[in-house]
Amino acid sequence: MSSIKIVLYFLAGLGVLANMFLLIFYIFIIPSHRHKPVDLISCQLTFVHIIMVLTGWDIWLTDMFELLNIENDIKCKATFYVNRVMRGLSICTTCLLSVFQAVTISPSTSLLAKFKHKLKKYIIYAFFYIWSFNLSFTSNQFFSVGAYTNVSETNQMKVSKYCSHFPMNNIIRGLILTVTTLRDMFLVGVMLTTSTYMVIILFRHQRQCKHLHSISYLRVSPEKRATQTIFLLVVFFVVMYWVDFFISSTSVLLWRYDPVILTVQKFVMNAYPTITPLVQISSDNRIINVLKNLWPKCHQTF
């Protein structure tokens, strides 16, 4: 096994373990504590990232499919479809998280304040729409991806050990790329807008605290900490997502995947779902307090 593949396995393993820990915390620990509407979104984002890492190219499912003796064509279609659905859900859910946090911290005089008490209701509707949209929008993967065949006449673009993209009509390929780009630009634009709004709110709040000179106001509130975390995740996501999108779009337009570029893309694809749970764990006081309470008990047991 090459050193690059070892690093990819390490990143994937770290991402799965961190996300599974976070998911267990959201499912079993948070219901017994005071939970927030954004916790539901974070829970979904964590689940999406687990599946996203598991369906990463040639990291986990390839070996599993070989053990189950499943045909390469079915394996490729299923892996690429699920991974692309999760990729779309990741950007949609991150955007949703940013929007709902902006509504949560908005002042009572803001136009967004009237939506605060209806957040849970809107979350259910939002989940339904983004899942329906991504499941249907990504269905083109069933026709454009399949098992690699060693036939030069088919002009396939090999993207993994067993899988390749099949050539399609230039108009259809351009249409899919255009719609995908417009969707991503809209969602990234919303994320950047809400993030800018949250920065302005935090700046005003910090300026008021300086005038008050109160120790209680100088402490970082849970809402402020959550806002800073989401802002950090949004910035990191935007950078990683557009690097991945640029590599994918360029490769599709040129109809060529360089092995080095493909390896770089694998790192980029696993970076965000791996870093996100680590940032969330380290910045959530509820998780930190639970771990602090468990540590003495575990120490006494051993």
Image (cartoon, grey):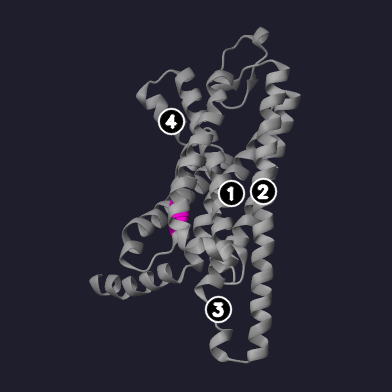
| 150 or 179, nearer to the observer | 179
Residue of label 3 = 220
Seen in the image, is 220 located left or right of residue 258? left
Mark pair 4, 2: CA separation: 34 Å
Which of discs 4 and 1 lies nearer the camera? The answer is 1
Number of numbered labels in the structure image: 4
**For mark 3, does the 10 Å Cα neighbourhood hold few (<14), some (14 to 19), or many (20 or more) residues?**
few
Horizontal and vertical percent position of residue 253: 74, 26
Q: Which residue is mark 4?
A: 63
**Is disc 3 placed on a helix, strand or loop?**
loop
Disc nearest the viewer among 3 and 1: 3
Which one is earlier in the sequence, the residue at label 4 or at label 3? 4
Give me the C-alpha separation between circle 2 and circle 3: 28 Å
* Element assignment for label 1: helix
| Between marks 4 and 2 in the image, the one whose residue lies nearer the viewer | 2
Say whether marks 2 and 1 touch (CB < 8 Å): no
Q: Position of residue 68 (x, y in %)?
A: 35, 25
Quadrant of residue 151 within the rendered picture: top right
